[in-house]
Image (tube, helix red, strand yellow):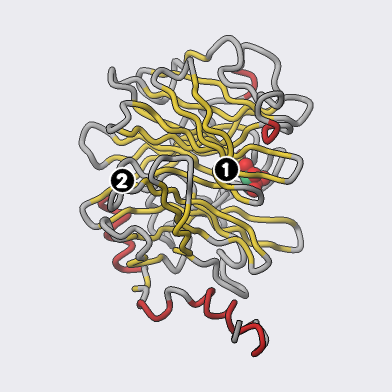
Amino acid sequence: MFPINHYETPMHATLLHRHRRNPILTASDWPYPINTVFNPGATLLPDGTTLLLCRVEDRRGHSHFCVARSKNGIDGWEIDPEPTLVPDPQHHPEELWGIEDPRITYVPELGRYVIAYTSYSRGGPGVSLALTEDFRRFERLGVVMPPEDKDAALLPRRIGGHWALIHRPTTALGSHIWISYSPDLRHWGSHKLILEARRGAWWDANKIGLSPPPIETPEGWLMIYHGVRQTASGCIYRLGLALFDLQTPERCLRRSQTWIFGPEAPYEREGDVNNVVFPCGYTVGADGDTLYLYYGCADTCISLATCSIRALLDWLREDGQVIEPSFRNALLEKEHSLQTPEEQSL
Ligand code: BMA
């Protein structure tokens, strides 16, 4: 007989382990009326407290952020009694329809956390940055990537003297992952495509995006990214891995062929948006290897999965494809080949 809940099948290596108390946070835990809570950014505070910056959607359909703190990162959550950061369309028109999907990076040079989030403007979703020391007061830097762009996170230190932001613009050629550089977090340039959505039947065809901020490892920046498979009955959001050079993060070294995690548990399969697992943050355990990945489930609630960073790297070595330099800018080359000979000579 087939098992009824066929998730965590032994046919594939289980790299990410769902916590048995999932989902760990739902709307019914909230101290004020909300529709859903999902896609949280995460960080470990200096005293060891896990802080989640949760995306909370109200019954207008607009999102804001609310902080939840826990001593063990699993239960006993203390949730701010009121919204922690609300959209401010009066001073920031780009936040007209809400703020979504925060990614937190602690930046030692600034002594502050930098939050990259989606600001939902009349023109579509863009990327905004805000700085905070304590998750009570925030300094907004405003839009740094205009629509349509989202799924952004800052690297925790400068690369060659410049800050580096990973993000996901959408263009006529699809939704791919890019990196941009800035001297001051406000002015961005040197944009480069770093990971291209595959084509055709692949699980990550046409649309990919950064999930949580990249994880710094001795082998490189380990990126957990999401791939969106469009099907006749809607989208399926799943997770894959890619590894980027530590000194030159625009250089992709390896990329997984198969996904490592997808919606299989009932709370991931069914909700406001079915078949979505969407992590925006993680913490690392005291052993330096255990990853606590916090993810939104079906745009409805929050769950936790744990894994070993070492196991992810080992698996990527086996499953991953080495990305040859000549393939790296395939998309840009394709773009070039779409131009007419007249355009090419301009
Ligand atoms: C993406 C983002 C996420 C959301 C997902 C599934 O485009 O907007 O916030 O979880 O879609 O709806």
Q: Quadrant of the N terminus?
A: bottom right
- Residue identifier under label 1: 127
Res 242 → quadrant: bottom left
The residue located at (59%, 30%) in the rendering is 55
Which is more toward the observer, 191 or 118? 191
Gap in angstroms between the C-alphas marked 2 and 1 = 19 Å
Label 1 neighbourhood size at 10 Å, few (<14), some (14-19), many (20+)?
many
* Mark 2 or mark 1, earlier in chain: 1
Q: Quadrant of the C terminus?
A: bottom right
- Residue found at the far bottom of this picture: 341
Query: How many numbered marks appear?
Result: 2
For disc 2, the marked residue is: 158
Residue type for callout 1: Val
Name the kind of residue labelled 2 in the image.
Arg
**Residue 326 location (% of width, % of height):** 39, 81
Q: Nearer the viewer, residue 21 or 120?
A: 120
